[in-house]
């Protein structure tokens, strides 16, 4: 055989991946409580670290966290970082250009230690800065699902 | 360490965008290459450890065909997930335990099989972050970069200077993927904005590539080569999940480095190390790593790049090979750094060689925003 052979590429989709995860009682309560427009966290009885969404064990001090340790948060927080995302993975293994850049924010909630990574909307580009006070914008109809949290927006 | 262990042979592929080669052929070539470089044969190997990630390989138990290509037929064999430096750590422990004398470590990824940025999304918490659906490794890196830059007055230009240094260094590296001898700060800043402040040339390219390293106990190492590269120190550490760590610093890299330095007897890293090879997936990670590795004080990373301290001619050259910005065959990237560091010590670094290298540091990482870090300190000249 002379020369370089043509590479025959093979594409496979092993199965349409649908995974079912049990979320556990703490996360279930977090998700169900979103219907009432409330954000729950879990405060570690060992070290005081507050997780959002709640967790049943503490990564910092390895204490067990129980349902009694669940706390209600204000849903307000501070933007500690942000980026204008122009691209995102397209689901098929490539990057796609977004039609319009979206603002992805790192939000530290009041009285919590975890940082949430959320879309941020309703901010003029010149007002977008670290330290901006933000709050949850809820979907018009909440039903007890993670999607009830629409995004974060500036306070006031 | 209770038993001294040395690197005695290595080989890597010509990392590139799409190698148009089967994974098995690619692995076979680097493993044969490492055996040839060491001057030993497959029969001399006691154990073989490979590294890859099933998601990136597109199959479960992905080492099935790799072991045979790596020379593990009817031998002791194991596989670790993620970076090749984790496989080297595992192999080192096997030799230290005294149960094996010679180990081959292999690592690979073909980015052309499945884009690593896509796979990054599957590492997120499925119950919340994946439901929200806006986070991926590029956006996360951008958030980290802005947090770090805001704390220490680092500018987009500083990130661009890191990219210029590494991409132009890569131009002299025959194995690198993205070589840009004449790239400028303006060109980097003008490259496509992915998630600001991260631009295309500040992020590692998606590469196909593999590499292999052979290690041996002191007795065997001295039989095999007159230029053993000793593993003097090693440290490994990982951060909490991305929601629960301080993204603005690489605390786990700091701990990994401290552990490795203690083992190697390094007191002043900037003076005691002659060259550093980093797995910086994004330009800002290199500046953060300067600080975590103790090459400068916290917040002073930008000064090293401003003053050229980490340039090829500088006091402490970092990534003379071009680093991960020069080529990023994901799971192989950290082990390639080990090879580049060993090459510097043996004086085999071709166009990337810096003068008088006795001690070198090699870094591997895995996970979003460098969640898990591994540091090796290597030494030569019979030290």
Image (cartoon, rainbow, N blue to C red):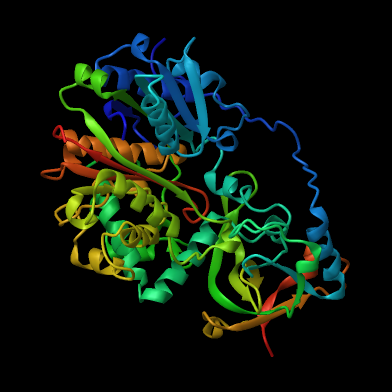
Q: Nearer the viewer, residue A25 or B370?
A: A25
Which x, y percent locates residue B150?
A: 42, 76
Q: Quadrant of residue A85?
A: bottom right
Residue with the most extreme bottom position: A156
Left or right side of B320 for B125: right
Residue B66 position (above or below residue B171): above
Task: Identify the residue at horizontal 53%, vertical 61% (top origin).
Answer: B140
Left or right for B24, reference B346: right
Residue B157 vs B361, above or below: the answer is below
The answer, for residue A122, to whether it is visible in the render is no
Residue A10 image offset from top left, x and y in percent? 60, 27
Residue B278, horizontal then vertical, whole percent = 33, 49
Residue A148 spot, x, y in % from top left? 80, 68
Figure disc tally: 0
Specify the quadrant that holds the N terminus of chain A.
top left
Position of B370 with respect to B166 (left or right) is right
When asked about the image quadrant of residue B88, the answer is top left
For residue B198, say whether it is visible.
yes
For the C terminus of chain A, the quadrant is bottom right
Residue at the image position 65 percent from the left and 48 percent from the top: A91
């Amino acid at each position: 055989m002379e020369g370089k052979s043509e590479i025959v590429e093979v594409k496979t989709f092993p199965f349409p991946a649908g995974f079912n995860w049990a979320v556990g009682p703490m996360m279930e309560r977090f998700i169900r409580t979103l219907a009432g427009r409330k954000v729950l966290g879990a405060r570690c009885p060992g070290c005081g670290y507050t997780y959002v969404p709640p967790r049943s064990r503490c990564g910092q001090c390895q204490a067990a966290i129980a349902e009694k340790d669940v706390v209600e948060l204000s849903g307000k927080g501070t933007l500690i970082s942000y980026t204008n995302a122009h691209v995102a993975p397209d689901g098929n293994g490539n990057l796609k250009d977004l039609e319009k850049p979206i603002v992805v924010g790192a939000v530290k909630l009041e009285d919590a230690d975890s940082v949430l990574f959320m879309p941020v909307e309703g901010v003029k580009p010149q007002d977008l800065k670290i330290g901006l006070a933000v709050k949850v914008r809820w979907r018009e109809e909440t039903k007890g699902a993670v999607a009830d949290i629409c995004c974060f927006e500036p306070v006031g | 360490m209770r038993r001294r262990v040395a690197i005695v042979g290595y080989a890597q592929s010509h990392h590139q965008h799409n190698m148009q080669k089967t994974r098995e052929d690619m692995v076979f070539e680097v493993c044969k290459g490492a055996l040839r470089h060491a001057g030993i044969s497959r029969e001399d190997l006691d154990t073989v450890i490979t590294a890859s990630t099933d998601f990136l390989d597109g199959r479960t138990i992905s080492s099935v065909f790799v072991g045979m290509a790596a020379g593990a037929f009817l031998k002791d064999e194991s596989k670790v997930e993620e970076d090749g430096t984790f496989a080297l750590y595992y192999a080192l422990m096997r030799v230290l335990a005294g149960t094996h004398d010679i180990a081959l470590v292999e690592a690979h990824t073909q980015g052309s099989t499945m884009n690593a940025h896509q796979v990054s999304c599957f590492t997120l918490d499925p119950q919340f972050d994946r439901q929200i659906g806006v986070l991926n490794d590029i956006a996360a890196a951008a958030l980290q970069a802005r947090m770090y830059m805001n704390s220490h007055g680092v500018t987009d230009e500083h990130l661009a200077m890191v990219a210029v240094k590494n991409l132009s260094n890569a131009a002299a590296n025959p194995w690198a993927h993205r070589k840009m001898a004449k790239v400028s700060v303006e060109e980097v800043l003008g490259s496509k904005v992915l998630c600001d402040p991260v631009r295309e040339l500040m992020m590692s390219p998606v590469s196909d590539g593999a590499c292999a390293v052979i290690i041996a106990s002191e007795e065997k190492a001295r039989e095999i080569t007159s230029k053993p590269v000793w593993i003097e120190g090693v440290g490994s550490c990982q951060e909490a999940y991305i929601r629960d760590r301080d993204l603005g610093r690489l605390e786990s890299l700091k701990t990994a480095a401290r552990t490795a330095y203690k083992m190697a007897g390094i007191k002043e890293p900037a003076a005691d190390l002659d060259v550093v090879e980093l797995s910086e997936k994004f330009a800002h990670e290199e500046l953060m790593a300067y600080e975590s590795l103790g090459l400068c004080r916290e917040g002073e990373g930008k000064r090293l790049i401003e003053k050229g301290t980490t340039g090829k001619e500088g006091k402490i050259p970092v990534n003379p090979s071009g680093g991960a910005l020069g080529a990023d065959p994901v799971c192989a990237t950290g082990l390639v750094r080990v090879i580049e560091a060993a090459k510097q010590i043996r004086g085999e670094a071709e166009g990337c060689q810096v003068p008088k290298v006795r001690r070198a540091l090699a870094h591997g990482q895995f996970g979003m925003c460098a969640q898990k870090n591994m540091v090796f300190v290597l030494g030569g000249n019979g030290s």
